[in-house]
Image: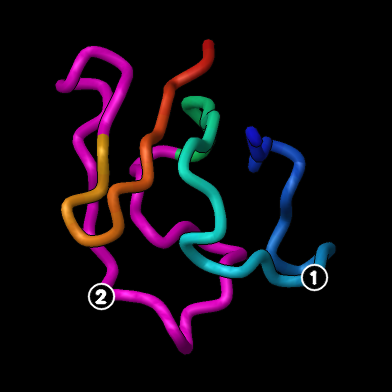
């Protein structure tokens, strides 16, 4: 199941459970990319880590939870 985070605004939408999905599509407006992302509930998640998705060729995987991020232009 994919989860599109582009339309999520932390102030406008309920929080997404952190690490609830295995694959997330992100855009350049989400950069710098971190896992968990803004708008995710953080209380039960891992420490925030920044992912070098551009340098990784448009795809990065979180070393803590294994979530896979794909940069969509």
User: Which numbered dot is residue 40?
Assistant: none
Residues rendered magenta in the picture: 31-60
Q: Where 20 sits versus 24, above or below?
A: below
- Disc 1 crowd rating (10 Å Cα; few below 14, some 14-19, many 20+) is few
Q: Which residue is mark 2?
A: 47
Residue 47 on the magenta span: yes
Q: Where 65 sits versus 4, above or below?
A: below
Residue shown at 76% from the left, 69% from the top: 11
Residue shown at 34% from the left, 43% from the top: 32
Q: Which residue is mark 1?
A: 14
Query: Is disc 1 in contact with disc 2, using a CB cutoff of under 8 Å?
Result: no
SS for tag 1? loop
Q: Is residue 14 left or right of residue 6?
A: right
Where's residue 67, x and y in %? Answer: 37, 46
Where's residue 55, x and y in %? Answer: 16, 21
Where's residue 52, x and y in %? Answer: 19, 35
Where's residue 19, x and y in %? Answer: 47, 61
Q: Nearer the viewer, residue 66 or 73?
A: 66
In terms of image quadrants, where is residue 2?
top right
SS for tag 2? loop
- Disc 2 crowd rating (10 Å Cα; few below 14, some 14-19, many 20+) is few
Question: Is the stretch drawn in magenta largely helix, strand or loop?
Answer: loop
Q: How many marks?
A: 2
Q: Where 30 sits versus 47, above or below?
A: above
Residue shown at 70% from the left, 71% from the top: 15
Q: Is residue 24 left or right of residue 13?
A: left
Q: Compute the Cα span from label 1 to label 2.
A: 21 Å
């Amino acid at each position: 199941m994919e989860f599109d985070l582009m339309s999520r605004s932390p102030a406008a939408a309920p929080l997404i459970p952190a690490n609830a999905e295995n694959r997330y599509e992100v855009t350049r407006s989400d950069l710098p990319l971190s896992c968990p992302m803004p708008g995710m509930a953080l209380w039960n998640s891992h420490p925030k880590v920044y992912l070098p998705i551009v340098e990784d060729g448009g795809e990065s995987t979180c070393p803590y939870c294994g979530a896979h991020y794909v940069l969509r232009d």
